[in-house]
Amino acid sequence: MRTESYRQHGHTIHEHRLEVPLDHRRPGAPTIGIFAREVVREGGEDLPRAVFLQGGPGYPAPRFGRFDSGWIARLLKDYRVVLLDQRGTGQSTRLDAQSLAELPSDRERADRLKLFRQDQIVFDAEALRRELCGDAKWTTVGQSFGGFITTAYLSLAPEGVEASLITGGLPGLVHVDEIYALTYERTAARNRAYFHRHPGDERTVREVAAHLADTEELLPTGERLSPARLRMIGMMLGGQGRTDQLHYLLEGPWVSVRGQRRLSSQFLQAVAAAVEVSPVYALLQEGIYACAAPALAGGATNWSADRLAEQIPGFAKDADPLDASEPYYLTGEHFMRRVYDEDPGLAPLAGAADLLASDTDWAPVYAPEVLARNTVPVAAAVYYDDMFVPRELSLDTAELMGARPYITNAFQHDGSAYSGGRVLSHLLDLIHD
């Protein structure tokens, strides 16, 4: 392992780089690089370590300018904090459309992607822990998908974990269809609450969607904006502060061009920013649920979100937005197959995405029989109205593994980032109680 150190705003920063196998289950596999940034407060050199596991999949650990506020400040009181770039993100052998394009076939691209799920990230973390801590354990702190990784950690390598804190990330150990049926239900509820607060925005969404069905409007990246892409701005409904930003996005979309109503360039730029996703997120959003536990082996995701959209009122992909007799909802963490035909950044990956949706030979990432015997202290924030991680399934998993839940409707999915450290403090109190 190579480490470089420097000072930043009164803290010591250690940047660690480690080579690990691309496939930890295959001896002699080629290697990839893993990067982690460790933050140590003044006088904290002898503190134990906590590793932060970011939400996603497909997004790196946060890059902080300062460390004196929020959850990072709270965590630094008790720990040296290791911010791990999960494989494929940040400086950990980034996986993106360009690097995937170097592989010669869709099959090879799909097989490579299957090595970037929870289980392999756990094995990376364990390799890093052994380098940093030797035989000592560390605490895991997982937000959203980071909680999924934590659950896999407690399934596959609990011997490395002292305690676990999870925020909005206790996964359901069920088929993806059951998970998405509940997330559609929560997303519909968030739409209704939002449109009740901003009825003018519902009219705007319907009018803009109808306009896009028969008028070509181009995003800054050059492709036509479709009603399906527009509806992806509903992701903003699941965040603590982003619903306000959604209202600002929708407050004035129109301009007049030669007497015709068109969408403004500012609106199109804002939509493009809101719907842009990491290719790894797009490709593995359903893959993280595929055959996730042994009882689910042999089943395909089969474009779950796309299929279920046609079964749940308000989400049909080709619904008439001007039909006031039916709801017309923005979507959430639901990725439609047609986006691969509409987004030029994802179009080259469509074949790999289809293979991932049909594959049935994924390795399990959770071991319920191990979780049932769990002795690692776990505290988990479960957000009552979470749009992305259904509370019912989270509580089932908490009961299985003996986690202490903190159930609250005071925050949305990203509550830990918006609570000023209060969510994390409450979980630490539960761990130490």
Image (tube, rainbow, N blue to C red):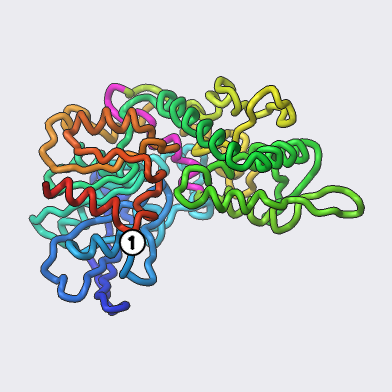
Name the residue beneath numbered marker 1: 70
Q: Give the position of the N terminus as an image quadrant.
A: bottom left
Name the residue located 33 percent from the left edge and 40 percent from the top edge.
408
* Above-or-below relation of 96 to 370: below
Residue 291: in magenta span: yes
Q: Which residues are magenta?
A: 279-295
* Above-or-below relation of 90 to 263: below
Q: Residue furthest front?
A: 197
The picture places residue 319, in percent across and down from the top left corner, at 68, 27
The picture places residue 138, in percent across and down from the top left corner, at 16, 54
Residue 216: in magenta span: no
Give, as a three-letter code, the residue at label 1. Gly
Name the element at disc 1.
helix
Mark 1 neighbour class, 10 Å CA radius: few under 14, some 14 to 19, many 20 or more: some
Name the residue located 35 percent from the left edge and 28 percent from the top edge.
291
Query: In the image, 70: left or right of 356?
Result: left
* Above-or-below relation of 378 to 327: below
Q: Residue furthest left?
A: 135
Task: In this rendered view, identify the residue nearer to me: 72 or 81.
Answer: 72
